[in-house]
Amino acid sequence: MDDVCEGKDFSFPEQELRVLQLWKENDAFNEQLRRTEGGEEFVFYDGPPFATGLPHYGHILAGTIKDVVTRHQSMRGRHVSRRFGWDCHGLPVEFEIDKALGITNRQQVFDIGIAKYNETCRSIVTKYVSEWEAVVTRTGRWIDFKNDYKTMDINFMESVWWVFAQLWKKDLVYKGFKVMPYSTGCKTALSNFEAALDYRTVPDPAVMVSFPIVGDADNAALVAWTTTPWTLPSNLALCVNANLTYAKVKDRTNAAVYIVAESRLGQLPVKVKASGKKQAPSKGSNAEGVQDGLDKESYELLAKIPGSSLVGLKYTPLFYFFMELQETAFRVIADNYVTDDSGTGVVHCAPAFGEDDHRVCLAAGIFETAGLVVAVDDDGCFIEKITDFKGRYVKEADKDIINAVKDKGRLVSKGSIEHSYPFCWRSGTPLIYRAVPSWFVKVEKIKDQLLECTKETYWVPEYVKEKRFHNWLEGARDWAVSRTRFWGTPLPLWMSQDGEEIVVMDSIEKLEKLSGVKVTDLHRHYVDDITIPSKRGPELGVLKRVDDVFDCWFESGSMPYAYIHYPFENKELFEKNFPGNFVAEGLDQTRGWFYTLMVLSTALFGKPAFKNLICNGLVLAEDGKKMSKSKKNYPSPTDLIDEYGADALRLYLINSPVVRAESLRFKRSGVYSVVKDVFLPWYNAYRFFVQNAKRLEVEGLAVFSLIDQASLLKSSNVLDHWINSATESLVSFVQQEMDAYRLYTVVPYLVKYIDNLTNIYVRLNRKRLKGRTGEEDCRISLSTLYHALVTTCVAMAPFTPFFTEVLYQNLRKASNKSEESIHFCKFPSTTGERDERVEQSVNRMMTIIDLARNIRERHNKALKTPLKEMVVVHPDNEFLEDITGKLKEYVMEEINVKTVTPCNDPLVYASLRAEPNFSVLGKRLGKDMGKVSNEVKKMTQEQILSFEESGEITFFGHCLKQDDIKVVRQFKRPENVSEKEIDAAGDGDVLVILDLRADQSLFEAGVAREVVVNRIQKLRKTVQLEPSDPVDVYYKSVDHDKNSLGEILNSQVKYIRDALGSPLVPKEMAPIDVVFVGEESHDVHDMSFVIYIARSCPLLSPDLLAHASGNNDHVEALRVYLLSRSLSRLKNQFQAGNGMITVDCIEGYPPINLQLGKHVFLSAGDFYLASGS
């Protein structure tokens, strides 16, 4: 393995770029596909984005979710084809071209030619493909760009034709004339779900208009309310509710008589009073002069009229643009869609511009379908027929129309209203509702089947399926799948001039066969001119293709079939693996792609399109607003990745509410927190392993080699068992949560695991890992840590593909059989070797350590100050055995306490108190909660102990279990002892008691800990020594009583040796030629001393002179020779010779055998120990 740098010097972005190069050199993604080929297929559908814009955080989020799932499934041995897709047709592309070419109406397209227009569209479709590939690749996502699919490819388009043809055969297609949401910005109708994509709160005019009833004795006029004045020129009827009661009232100021619903009288305008102030409309009948909502000072009630009596009445038209319909139009009709909770109870009907208007007017015979005139053209402007406003854009004409109504004396009131209104999701222009001819899929006919198919799918989060998607399906309307546009897949319908003969093409082959024309492209400018002869004979002419193209949502909904050119190719592959396993997109796709996928799969096969779905929420700017390039209210994704790395961004997104379909306020600081709280602790654990594995070589021992897992499981060390069990739990948890597609639960578990790995296993095993407890024990602990690191990396590789690869590439050097990439590894199998008791005991141990630290902090007792005793109180004897047995050493070291005493009788040190768990019991007990609660609080010590033993107790017929009652242990301090002498802390489960009193032995231990653990380790860092660098440490007292410090250090010699790995040597024992690399003076507990650090070097024993036949020159030559040698190589040589080497290379002197520990010592510490000083 290679040496690794400190965490502060580790550049995540730079390392990720190296990993990208490694993947490229190894063709890693394709190699993974090759290795899983023949395995179980995991079918993933990638929703195609438009390539007319750059990727943003929403795309990165969805891409990360998809990458995590597909990588994980690949590591489970499944074959996961991942092809990137591009949505190439439709409004987004045409809108860009219209802006670029200055096109404002359809005729301009015909003027330049559909061929030129479409080819211009084709030219920009792949405008940002290279940028997309760069960003997607940089984020670590593995997906095939070379073998991508495009909705404009001829194979894709042919499959779309096939899908439509199947719907036609099933009688699920019809042509209709329907009022639909219409975008004047994009000059096309939109589907209902497209209209729901962009609602905004906007102000609109709100006017009341009078419609005088022909022949009424009081010259009464019906009053209608509308927020779309531009529809008034097209008024053909008024609609009331026959079941409502209407009121005829007289305006006291001008004698005008109005008819409105009785319940809406309060909406009539209130006239100016004598005071000159207007009175607000009444909201009740308690105000003086107000009755039933009517302001009696302004109006006089003349009569109450049943709504049914109004039906059939004729009224005077507001405008005279449609007088040709006067025989059937301009009369009152009725329908229950008119309600009494808004407006006036009278609805003005313009059947060309309202869905309900169209329905009720058609049913009442106001017009015939063929005779309906749509007074607004494709550009949203009034046609020639509306002479007063011809050529005017409808929304801009509102003001002039209101003035015209006022001039006619028909304006009852004018105001404005702020309401939610739909806008075009692409052009950002307000939608209008407009009657258009379209081809429809009969969604309402298959609605029940749609609901049943949806039940077969699994969604995360579930509520999106059960609420949002279900409700949308419940209200599903027939789907208008055609668009009067140019750049799209043409409808495969060839129709005769009289409309009696229709041929639907389900393949290119069929079109070529019927037309005799070779087809090389399916776009309009290639197929519009292709005709086919009529089956009824040449005298009836030829069939021509209808002008429309498909809604691009129809294409994306066809993606599961079209991207593999089904049924023309891959028939077996598709039919064996449909429905697909997995899709993932944003919340907005519940009314978009998820919906169209489900509609088409249900209609075609009676199945859902997918089995599992993850729905993500919106990524917002930090201020909660939509991310905006112009406002620059979010950091650039590429800049952020260059600063923190893609893995940090991936983990930040996955560990946020956005994966649960909630919104995320994106924060740069959140990405930094992932680096600080997840990656750096993880890296430090890895670095600690590498340093200590490499240390074996430095110390002349055999190179680290991995001990097999079966042998590791036999380790006698409790923390080895614990980390193995915790690692097994991590693997099991990740697999369980990934099977349930709950990505957001994995990261918190990982963070906890890494915290445990670094702060429990590594921290508490430092001596073992550094070799202070013997070489064999060191190798066992290093192998255990290696296994934990590698297993964690493999389990988490789908989430953090770069970081885990970096660690793995170095770690794999310790294992000859390792795969070339971590992403070729199989997901770790769960062995079932979990030890829940050990996991629980270690968790409780950490609780004890935290409680003891809390006591120390409360009394300002630093951790370096040893304490005499800690008592652990808990009724579980097994737990106490663990704490005072195999975990005792760790507890004592972490708390710095001399003894740990168990106590299983809680009443010795504590009194018990029972508290009811209100959050659990409240719902269950209802009105009995109060009296049961009182009984719980009155439980005696004996009752509580009995309850803890049996696990239940009954009050007033309610059996309470352990989750229903919390037992609180309160410390009972011994008599004649103050809080400063003994104190306790508990968490309701375990009680910890610390003896805070000092004595001489504790003082001596404290000095040793302060000198060794604190001062020496800091000095090592100051002089920039690596942990594996062999050094000798010396001390010198500068006090008058120079023996005092020496006596204290001698009393703590074992602790010092364990902490340093070598003894602390008096300065006077240093060799004459020693070179100190660092020294510091200190004052601790009124003792002054100096610490020195020198690199270790060989020392010769005084016995060597006799062994060298008394030849001082020979001894000096040996000294020079040994000092010239590498200490680690010298150590290896002694080890190979069982502690003996022969020096025969010194010219002029005979060979001589040197024995380690007798003639030669490799450090001053070794010599000091051997001398017995």
Image (cartoon, rainbow, N blue to C red):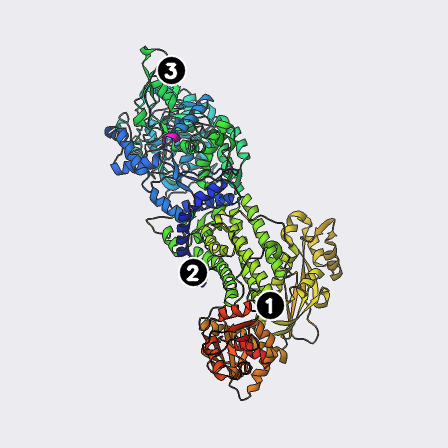
Residue labelled with disc 3: 500
Residue labelled with disc 1: 773
- Of the numbered discs 1 and 2, the one sitting upstream in the chain is 2
Q: Secondary structure at mark 2?
A: loop
Task: Report which quarter residue 221 is drawn in.
Answer: top left
* In the foreground, 255 or 1158: 1158
Q: Position of residue 224 (x, y in %)?
A: 39, 31
- Of the numbered discs 3 and 2, the one sitting upstream in the chain is 2
Q: Is residue 562 visible?
A: yes
* In the foreground, 992 or 1067: 1067
The amino acid type found where label 3 is placed reads Glu
The amino acid type found where label 2 is placed reads Phe
For the C terminus, the image quarter is bottom right
Q: Are marks 3 and 1 in contact (CB under 8 Å)?
A: no
- Of the numbered discs 3 and 1, the one sitting upstream in the chain is 3
Q: Position of residue 700 (x, y in %)?
A: 52, 67
Query: In the drawing, does residue 738 fall left or right of residue 239?
Result: right
Q: Is residue 1148 above or below residue 904?
A: below
Residue stretch rendered in magenta on the structure: 151-156
Q: Nearer the viewer, mark 3 or mark 1?
A: 1
How busy is the neighbourhood of tag 1: few (under 14 within 10 Å), some, or many (20 plus)? some
Q: Secondary structure at mark 1?
A: loop
Number of marks: 3
Residue labelled with disc 2: 10
The amino acid type found where label 1 is placed reads Thr
Query: In the drawing, does residue 589 fall left or right of residue 394?
Result: right
Q: Are marks 1 and 2 in contact (CB under 8 Å)?
A: no
